[in-house]
């Protein structure tokens, strides 16, 4: 959920670049307010009163005034063409003490009330309250507790930044996606189904990483995270007494042989340069030491970096389990939990979106603060977005051993170096804003 705070602060930064217009009516389900001096609302399913009006109106920057010295009245350089000064302005604003304190407060409030998949009621309420306070338009609910907010002209191009719960002109619209149920439940898939990506042409997201020092940005083009699935197989034989095994059909023997055979899928069928994993992690049979059980349940996980390899693994796992069980006169059924949305495709970064993230990170934070990272066998439901539109997913380091910030996000000892928050917010905001400027 740390990305929730980052994306909220990104919204604060981007909102600070816009002068609000007069209020206009809003449609049911939309919490819509004026955007960037347009005389009419540019919310979902709405358009400006005329293309000429939308084309000529400019978004003026409050940030110019915020950063101007008492003796300086001239604005900062125009950022219609992005320069180093633009990046420095965003990072400077993000690091102002009052903004850092606000961001830390939001993070701590969210972590005082952790909520599970599709139960993020208080988190969602807090996000909406902050969006209201910042005068940011949004639509709620999507995927039960999810939110889609937007900032900018209300017209194309549209670029999205996603968080899982978690006088700089803007020529276009930034869509803020606050998504529930990343850890379980495929919240991204539900958000897409509810229209979170409507009109969006590119999407970006960040994930904290305990492997990289605080403030380091890491990513790569192409496959970044593996596709992930789970399986559960029931191998059925016939129970019998251990002293007379010939009167039974031994499901334990069949299951043991099946576990060994499953290891050959990757080691003997997969290209060694195409990383794949099949791991059996559960084996449950009988509990009587003198009886051969009627059946055995085995289960595990599979990972791969391409959809082709991933779905080939699904096919071969089922074939091996069913056929190997039959060798020992047993029957078998295999469940991949497809109806429970536990299959995640690989997360694949679009080459151009990755290059955009790389340029932003290097210009904003310096060339040494961006790293090309290797693919990882972890999985993320951001992959569903990357299947639909060009996407860029990146890590932001939080490792600070002095503070104890070096445990994985799934550890009960997880702790975050809060110095990362303004850096992440500035990076998110600059990625979105610079994308629109370069597309405009």
Image (cartoon, rainbow, N blue to C red):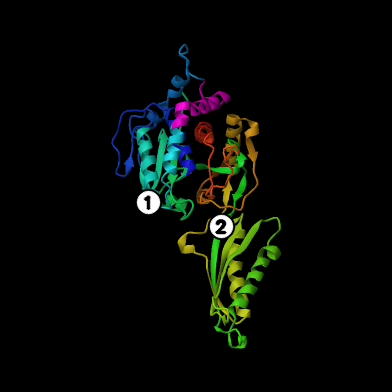
Seen from the viewer's position, the closer of residues 313 and 253 is 253
Helix, strand or loop at label 2? It is strand
Residue 435 circle label: none
Name the residue furthest top: 71
Apparent side of residue 304 relative to residue 205 in the rendered image (left or right): right
Residue 320 lies in what quarter of the image? bottom right
Residue 144 circle label: 1
Name the residue furthest front: 289
Seen from the viewer's position, the closer of residues 345 and 211 is 211
Q: Is residue 59 above or below residue 256?
A: above
Could you say where residue 218 lies in the image, as x and y percent from the top left? 61, 40
Seen from the viewer's position, the closer of residues 248 and 393 is 248
Q: Which residue is located at x 59 percent, y 31 percent?
A: 365
Q: Is residue 386 above or below residue 331?
A: above
Dominant secondary-structure state across the stretch colored magenta: helix
Query: Would residue 114 be seen by someone viewing this image from the given angle?
Result: yes
Give neighbour class at mark 2: few <14, some 14-19, many 20+ (Cα, 10 Å). many
Query: Would residue 158 be seen by someone viewing this image from the given angle?
Result: no
Could you say where residue 298 lies in the image, as x and y percent from the top left? 56, 69
Could you say where residue 21 lies in the image, as x and y percent from the top left? 34, 28
Helix, strand or loop at label 1? It is loop
Q: Which residue is label 2 attached to?
A: 228
Residue 252 lies in what quarter of the image? bottom right
| Residue 246 is covered by the magenta coloring | no
Q: What segment is highlighted magenta in the picture?
A: 77-101
Q: How many marks?
A: 2
Could you say where residue 426 lies in the image, as x and y percent from the top left? 51, 32
Q: Which residue is located at x 33 percent, y 37 percent?
A: 32
Q: Which residue is located at x 53 percent, y 25 percent?
A: 86
């Amino acid at each position: 959920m740390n990305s929730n705070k980052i994306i909220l602060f990104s919204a604060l930064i981007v909102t600070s670049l816009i002068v609000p217009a007069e209020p206009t009516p809003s449609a049911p389900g939309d919490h819509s307010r004026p955007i960037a001096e347009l005389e009419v609302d540019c919310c979902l399913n709405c358009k400006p009163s005329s293309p000429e009006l939308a084309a000529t109106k400019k978004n003026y920057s409050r940030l110019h005034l915020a950063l101007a010295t008492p003796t300086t009245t001239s604005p900062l350089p125009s950022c219609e063409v992005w320069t180093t000064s633009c990046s420095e302005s965003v990072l400077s604003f993000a690091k102002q003490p009052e903004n850092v304190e606000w961001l830390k407060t939001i993070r701590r409030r969210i972590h005082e009330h952790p909520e599970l998949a599709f139960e993020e009621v208080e988190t969602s309420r807090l996000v909406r309250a902050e969006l209201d306070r910042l005068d940011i338009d949004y639509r709620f609910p999507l995927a039960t507790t999810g939110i889609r907010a937007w900032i900018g002209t209300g017209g194309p191009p549209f670029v999205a930044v996603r968080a899982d719960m978690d006088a700089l002109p803007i020529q276009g619209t930034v869509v803020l996606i606050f998504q529930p149920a990343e850890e379980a439940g495929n919240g991204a898939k539900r958000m897409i189904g509810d229209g979170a990506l409507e009109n969006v042409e590119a999407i970006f997201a960040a994930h904290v990483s305990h492997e990289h020092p605080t403030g380091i940005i890491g990513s790569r083009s192409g496959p970044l995270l593996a596709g992930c699935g789970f399986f559960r197989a029931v191998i059925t034989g016939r129970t019998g007494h251990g002293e007379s095994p010939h009167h039974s059909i031994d499901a334990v023997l069949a299951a043991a042989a099946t576990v060994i055979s499953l290891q050959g899928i990757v080691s003997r069928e997969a290209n060694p340069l195409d990383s794949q994993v099949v791991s059996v992690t559960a084996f449950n049979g009988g509990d009587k030491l003198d009886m051969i059980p009627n059946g055995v349940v085995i289960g595990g996980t599979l990972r791969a970096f391409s959809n082709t390899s991933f779905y080939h693994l699904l096919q071969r796992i089922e074939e091996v389990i069913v056929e190997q069980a039959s060798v020992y006169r047993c029957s078998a059924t295999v469940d991949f939990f497809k109806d429970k949305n536990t299959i995640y495709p690989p997360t694949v970064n679009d080459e151009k979106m990755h290059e955009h993230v790389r340029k932003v990170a290097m210009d904003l934070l310096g060339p040494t603060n961006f790293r090309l990272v290797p693919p990882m066998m972890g999985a993320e439901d951001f992959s569903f977005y990357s299947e639909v539109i060009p996407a860029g997913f990146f890590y932001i380091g939080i490792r600070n051993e002095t503070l104890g910030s070096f445990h994985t996000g799934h550890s009960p000892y997880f702790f975050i170096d809060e110095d990362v928050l303004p850096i992440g917010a500035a990076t998110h905001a600059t990625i979105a804003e610079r994308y629109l400027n370069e597309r405009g």
